[in-house]
Image: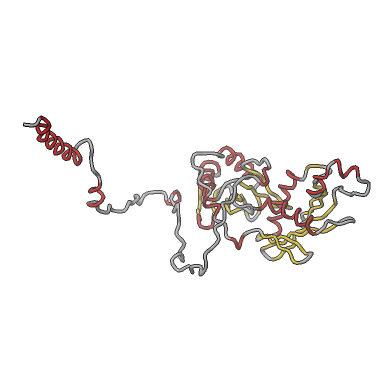
Amino acid sequence: MNAALKWIPLALAGALALAGCARDGFYDDRNLDYVESAPAPPLTLPETRDQSRYQSALPIPADGDSAARPEEPVEARAPRPLTAARGLKENYVTTRKIRDRRWLVVADDAASVWPRLERFARTRAGGIERSRPSRGVLETREGTLRLDSAVRPGASEVHCERAGQPRAACLERLERYLASQSGGEDTLSSLNAQRVDEQRAVQLRRSGDDVSVRIPYSADRTWAEIAHYLALDFDQPGERELLESDAASHSFTVNYQTLDNRRRGVLAQLNPFADDSARKVRLTLDEQGDQSRLRVQGVEEPTLSVDARRELLERVSGYLR
């Protein structure tokens, strides 16, 4: 008999042995597990649980199924970077104020800040007396904590009030507590913050020589936000400098040198007829209901050109994007 044929029975026996191992041995074939699988009963939580500690992580809008579908393809926009405005160094928690109003701005979306606010209420504010998550409100012995989306996407506003008046001591403790929580394990993805409604977006508009910025927030909130960033950014004498802030008229007076003039450098200094100095201008917010409009007005001659005004408005409105 041919010697090679002697190995055929042994090979067949080995194949049968391996086939048996493929289901119950070391090489388990799990394809049939998915075919034979059955749905498991839904997970239920005990009735004795604390209702205030549980909420939907991904809530489904009530009218989601009935929402009208677009008739044409919709442009997919790139995610918005959730960093400090124009690379400015910014703390995780900062203060905003206008007249007698004061609140905190946290560099995180509301979904991340809410559980931290609940922990603060339980441990530092005497406990939660009433919770209304859909409205972002926690009522405590210390006062009413209110959470809302901030003017700048990806950030949140936190208020602590009693009878409509800010509680300074509460805000100070809250600021320290939230600052200590920055970068914690429960920090969520920024995907929720990046779902920005285009109807609530800052828009630059131009009609002939008239250029302005439409801002979908009240003049008070917008003025406080711009005031915060101008104090950080307009601190370069000769280039850009904040001269005056007026909360009553929702305006700012600044010195501003255009980008083209800054780039001329030594060559501009050699030309006695070139005027590349900074211009004094006024940034004004016009109240338009629950919205506002940002404009640039000249204070001295010669005034900024249309392109220069657009450049300045783009820089300032960039704080709110």
Expressed as whole percent of the image width and height from the top left, the position of residue 193 reads: 55, 52
Would you say 176 lies left or right of 211 here?
A: left
Would you say 9 lies left or right of 92 here?
A: left
User: From this viewpoint, which residue is outermost toward the top?
Assistant: 3
Residue at left offset 61%, top offset 51%: 157
Q: How many marks?
A: 0
User: From this viewpoint, which residue is outermost toward the right?
Assistant: 272
In the image, residue 122 above or below residue 203 = above
Residue 206 location, quadrant:
bottom right
In the image, residue 265 above or below residue 317 = above
Q: Nearer the viewer, residue 231 or 276?
A: 276
Q: Nearer the viewer, residue 59 or 162?
A: 59
Residue at left offset 79%, top offset 55%: 308
Expressed as whole percent of the image width and height from the top left, the position of residue 108 reads: 57, 46
Q: Nearer the viewer, residue 242 or 125?
A: 242
The N terminus - image quarter: top left
Expressed as whole percent of the image width and height from the top left, the position of residue 237 reads: 83, 42
Q: How is the image coloured?
A: secondary structure
Expressed as whole percent of the image width and height from the top left, the position of residue 104 reads: 64, 47
Residue at left offset 26%, top offset 50%: 34
User: From this viewpoint, which residue is outermost toward the left?
Assistant: 1
In the image, residue 66 above or below residue 232 = below
Would you say 37 lies left or right of 124 here?
A: left
